[in-house]
Image (cartoon, grey):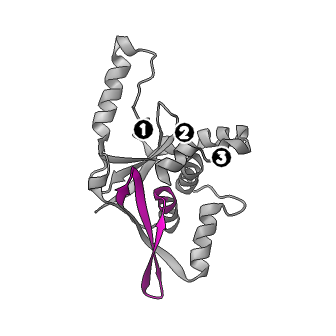
Amino acid sequence: MIQVKVRNIGLDSITGSPIVMLANIENEDEIYPIWIGVSEAEGIIISQSGLETPRPLTYDLMKNVVEALGGVVKYVEIPEKRENTYIADVVIEKDGEEVRVDARPSDAINLALRFNAPIYIEESVFQKLSLKELLEASKQVENSPETAGQEVQGQVETKTEKQQDIDRELEEFRKLLENAKPEDFAIKPEDKEKEN
C-alpha cells in the first residue's frame, strides 16, 4: 500500500460528477481519482478550506461521536475493489486496540481529513494518472485549432496551485449553496452503484 493525500476535487467534464484526486505522498505527479457524490465532495472542500460551520455537519458529528467514545481515527485505507466499487476501512484506535469499520472511500477520506489521519490505498486496484501528462494533454487540446472552444471529453479539471484550487472550489460551493434545492442532493441510482 502507498500513502496518499487529497490533492483537490475535480469535475468529470462529461457527467459533471465530483472526483477526489488522491496524490501519492512520495510522487505527487501520480494521481488516483475516485468519483464521489456532491455532499461528500462538499465535506472534503469544507475540511480543506478550514471553514467553520455554525453547527456540526455529518462528518464533524462522526468525529465528535468517535472522540466522545474515547477513540481516534488512526488511519484509513482503500485496499480493494469489488464489482467496480472501492472498499474502504476506517481504523479507529480505542484503549490501545484497533477497530476496523467498513466505509465508503469518500466517507473514510472525510474522516481522515478531520482527524489528520493518513490515507493508504492499494495501488494495484486504482487507475493511475500522471498529472504532467494530463496538463500536457490539456495544453495541446487548448492550442489545437480543431478543438478550440470545444469541451474535451474524459479530461479532469486540475490546477497546479493549491490555494487557487481551494478558492475556486469554495466559490463554486458558495454558488451551489445559493441555488441549492433539497432534490439536488438526492442520491441517484447511478451514484449508489459507483460507491454503494
* Distance in Å between CA atoms under marks 2 and 1: 10 Å
Packing grade of label 2 (10 A; few <14, some 14-19, many >=20) is: few
Residue in the picture at 35% in, 17% down:
143
Point out the stretch of residues depicted in magenta. Answer: 80-109
Q: Residue furthest bottom?
A: 95
Residue 81 covered by magenta stretch: yes
Report if the CB atoms under discs 2 and 1 are less than 8 Å apart: yes
Mark 2 or 3: the one toward you: 3
Q: Amino acid at mark 2?
A: Arg
Precedes in sequence: disc 2 or disc 3: 2
Residue in the picture at 42% in, 62% down:
88
Which type of secondary structure does the marked residue at label 1 adopt?
Answer: loop
Residue labelled with disc 1:
159
How many marks can you see? 3
Which type of secondary structure does the marked residue at label 3 adopt?
Answer: loop
Q: Quadrant of residue 122?
A: bottom left
Precedes in sequence: disc 2 or disc 1: 1
In the displayed structure, would residue 62 be above or below residue 39? below
Q: Amino acid at mark 3?
A: Ala
Q: In this rendered view, identify the residue nearer to me: 102 or 74.
A: 102
Residue labelled with disc 3:
186
Tell me the number on the disc at residue 168: 2
Report if the CB atoms under discs 2 and 3 are less than 8 Å apart: no
